[in-house]
Every structure is written in C-alpha cells, then in structure tokens.
Amino acid sequence: MTTLSEPRAFRRIAVFGGVYSNAHALAATLADVRRREVDAVFCLGDLGGCGPHPDRVFPLLRDAGVRAIQGNYDLAVAEGHTDCGCGYTDPRDNHFAHLSYAYTLARTATENRRWMAALPGHRRLRLGGLPALLCHGSPRAISEFLWESTTPDGLVARFLDDARAQLILCTHSGIKWHRRLADGRHLVNVGVIGRPENDGTTGVWYTLLTAESGGDLDVEFVPVAYDHEMLAKEMDAEGLPPEFAETVRTGWWTTCLEVLPGRERSQGRF
Amino acid sequence: MAFRHLAALWVQITGTLCNLQCVHCINASGPREPWLPPLDAETARRHITEAAALGVKEIYFTGGEPFMHPAIMPLLAFALERAPTTVLTNGTLITDATADALVALAAAARYSLEIRVSLDDPDRERNDAIRGRGAFERALRAIVRLNARGLLPILTATETEAAPGGDRYARLRALLLEAGVRKPRVKLLPLFPVGRAQGRGGGTVTREMLAAVDPARLQCSETRAAAAGGIYVCPILSGLPEARMDGATLADTLVPNRVDHPACLVCWQTGSSCRNA
C-alpha cells in the first residue's frame, strides 16, 4: 500500500472514519467542520458499508476536499473481493456482512471504485510539531481492530516506534478512544460517522485535533446529530436488513458483534 | 514460516494437568501424572513481562485446566496490568467465589479479561461422551454464573467427529439463549490431529502450499507459547519437542519456524486462529 506525505504542517485538522454510505451523517459532519477553522479534513476509510445508495458519499467527499485513505471496505469494493475482509467467523455476522457488502458492491459506480482504488493506504503529516501517521485499522494491518480495552500501552508504543511518529490516528472498530502514553505520545481512534457507537444514542462522532508548534496535542471528540430517521427509511426502502436500520434508530449495534471484546460488548444492548 | 509480529503469548500454566480427560484433547491432558508439568509462576511472569515489552497484544492462559494452578489469580492480575488477558477453562472449578473474584479482577483491570469455557456439543449426552460425565452441566453453570455477573464468557467448541452438524453455531447460540445468556458468544475451533486426536488427519503442508498462503492465515507467524521446557511455536503444539524454539528469551524465538506437523495442515486449510477474534 502507498503512503502519502503532506508537504506542510497543520495546526488543526478534522478526522473521521467509517462513512458506511451514510451521506446524511457525512453532510452534517462536513457542515460542522466548516465552522471549526480547520486546515484540512481527513477520512480514514470505509466509505461503503451498511447504508443505502453508496454513490452518494463520493461527491460530498470530493467537493469538500476531504483527503481520504483506503479502508478494508474500499479495498474490497475497488478490487471486487468476495467479502469485506472483516474476518467474521460467526455465521450470523457473516450473513449480515455479506448482505451489506453485496449490496454496496453492486451499486458502486466504476468511477467511484477507481477513485477508491487510487487512495493511499496511509498518510503522514505534521500536526504542530508532531509527526503523525494516519491508518485505517492499525499501522500494520488494514483490518486489525484497535479497541480501547484490548490495545495495551506496549503495543501502542511499538506502533509509534515503528512508525517514527508521535501520533497515530486510526478507525475501523467503530468506537472512539484516545490513549496518551506516559512519554507523551498518542494514539487516537477517531471513531466513525456511519453509525452510532453502541451506546443507545443516535448521533455519531468525529475528531478535532489541534497542536500548536511546540505545544501538546488537544483531542476533541465532536458529536454530530443528523437525520437518522431519514437514513433508516432509505435503508428500509432499499430492502436492507431491518437489523441495520434498527441500529440507526436506536443507537445499539445488532450485528457483527463477534469482534467486540467482552468489555465493549457488555456496554451494548445485544 | 516467516515471523511477522508477536500478537499473542500463550502461557500453558498447568502443563497437561487437568481434572477432565477429553477424547480430543490437543495435548492429552488429564488428572494423572502430567507428561508436561505446570509452569512455575516466576517463569510465567518473566515471559509475560518480556512479551509486554515486545508489544504483545494479548496474553492467553491455558493448560490443562488453568484454575488448578495455585497462583492463577495473582498471575491473571499480573498479566492484566500489561495486556488484555484470556483464560481457557473447562469451567468446572468456577464456583460462585471464583466467579466473584474474576469479576472483581476484570472490574479493576485496565484491559479486557476474557473467560473461554469449553463445551463441545449442545447435546448433553454427546458433549459428556467427549468431555466426561457431568462436564456439560458444570460448564454451562460456569457460563451462567459469569454471565449473571456481567462478565461475558465465550463458549468455545471443538468440531469433533462425534458431534457433527453444520448448524452447530446456531445450536450452541440457542443453548446459551435458553440458559438465559442474553449476549451469547461462541467460538468454534477445528479438530487438530495431535494429542489424543493424533492420527485423525492426513498429510502435511507442502512447500508449494506454504508459498501460496497469506502468512496472516497461519498463527505461528504471530504467536508463541510458553510452557515447561521453553518456548514453543504455537499453542496447539506447545510442549512437543519438535515444536520447541531455540533461544533463551522470548525475543530469540521470534524467527522463522517449521510448518511440518499434521496439525499445521489444519491451520493452513481453515485459517483458524486460537485467538478470540
């Protein structure tokens, strides 16, 4: 996979992941970002997913100048893989994952598949004085889940050492978290904007990161409300499984629960 | 097989000492004199400390039956200070008091504590024919005890010939739901031709097969197992002389390994990992 490096340093950036074809949440996120005086906007991948009308997110991303990297879903759709690459073994999870993947693959225009195929796997930038690496799952694997309860400090340090970075940004798991190591380095899972994060609320989250030159990093998780009922109705109209729309309406994950560690699973309804 | 990174360290803490004697056990564990002795706590702590420094993602305790080790609770606490930790158990020794202690440990820990309880078949008779009389009831009771306290155990089943059925996943899930487990978690493992199941597989991984495989499909590219006698290539072959890695430290063993045991063919075929997910 390729890595793109940004030529200039930034002071403040907005970063989100996991759009999952949720054009309503994407539009609301971009509207919120426009009020925040950011230098650049980044998307850490997974543009398609469980939502309807996958082609609708691409013009929004392009028009806003969002700098994206490739997620496992984007890689799979771009190359026409047989599944999304999340690695489920639970037949129930696989059933739902296949439904959303087949729907997305069949409805993503060739032009957009080409656009995703050309996305870099990683990006490097400087935020304030901090060298940062942007990835989808983890620096070493596009489909590796980094959950707060199963990502030890020693692993974070290893990732930062290997990346020669002070900051790593990732997504993929769907729940945001921030770890500041004792030595002052950071890993931030920026969360996703495509679906709520299994806490019984319907909003989604993106992340604002600010670092003055020579100063420490400020991480702000920003809540975004959007017309989730409209999204759910569109999902119903497209014949997507009612379990997907239920998540959008209730804020509780209903499928693909196998990958959740016990601690994160215990915080959800199912 | 080239080594990629250390994702998981397995600690075979009780060696092959177990209070059950399952017909398919990968390391022929049982209650009589174990062929592989338990690991002393000091050695286990040394390996866990080194693994954490190397950036390990998860620690697993296995055996035999880990809850037969006198130092298991302090060892779990020690591991949980450094990394997410999982125990593989038959559940028979998880009393109310042990369940309470595990829940307290999990609540105080920074990282996730997972308990995997082995139960091979949703049918009581078929399960107990594999795992011994009463094993079904005691395992299910352990799952219910832990679940009632909010610690969500993972039911782990081995796909033995004696318990066939393509719908096994759904049946195990249904069993848990029926027992009142509202967030059922199930993991299936293939049968490995090693230990008491030795001879139940045919062939080995050829050089051509190895060249064609994505290294991420083989867990020996990201795992090592500590047991009495040293560091071994993976948890399936732990304790076997031919699977012992050279080296005085864990770091010494993170080098390419042989993939020539009949059990390696199962990994190659299924891409199955002994890890939780």
Image (cartoon, coloured by chain):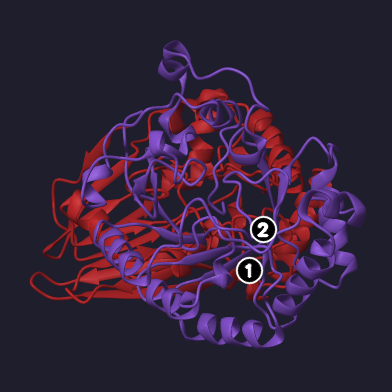
Chain colours: A red, B purple
> Which residue does the numbered mark 2 point to in the structure image?
A257
| Amino acid type, mark 1 | Arg
**Tag 2 subunit:** A
Q: Secondary structure at mark 2?
A: loop
Quick one: B225 or A94, which is closer to the camera?
B225
Q: Position of residue B166 (x, y in %)?
A: 83, 36
| Residue holding disc 1 | A265
Residue furthest to the top in view is: B208
Give x and y (percent) for residue B22. Answer: 71, 50
Work out whether residue A204 or residue A163 is closer to the camera in this orientation and state it: A163
Q: Is residue A116 left or right of residue A243?
A: left
Marks 1 and 2: same chain? yes
Mark 2 and mark 1 in contact (Cβ < 8 Å)? yes
Seen in the image, is B95 located left or right of residue A159?
right
The number of numbered badges drawn on the structure is 2
Is residue A37 in sight in this rendering?
no
Circle number at residue A218: none
Image location (x, y in percent) of residue A174: 53, 60
Q: Earlier in the sequence, mark 1 or mark 2?
A: 2
Q: CA distance from mark 1 to mark 2?
A: 7 Å
Disc 1 secondary structure class: helix
Quarter of the picture containing the N terminus of chain B is top left
Q: Position of residue A63 (x, y in %)?
A: 43, 45
Q: Nearer the viewer, residue A56 or A136?
A: A136
Q: Is residue B213 above or below residue A266?
A: above
In the rendered structure, which amino acid carries the disc numbered 2? Leu
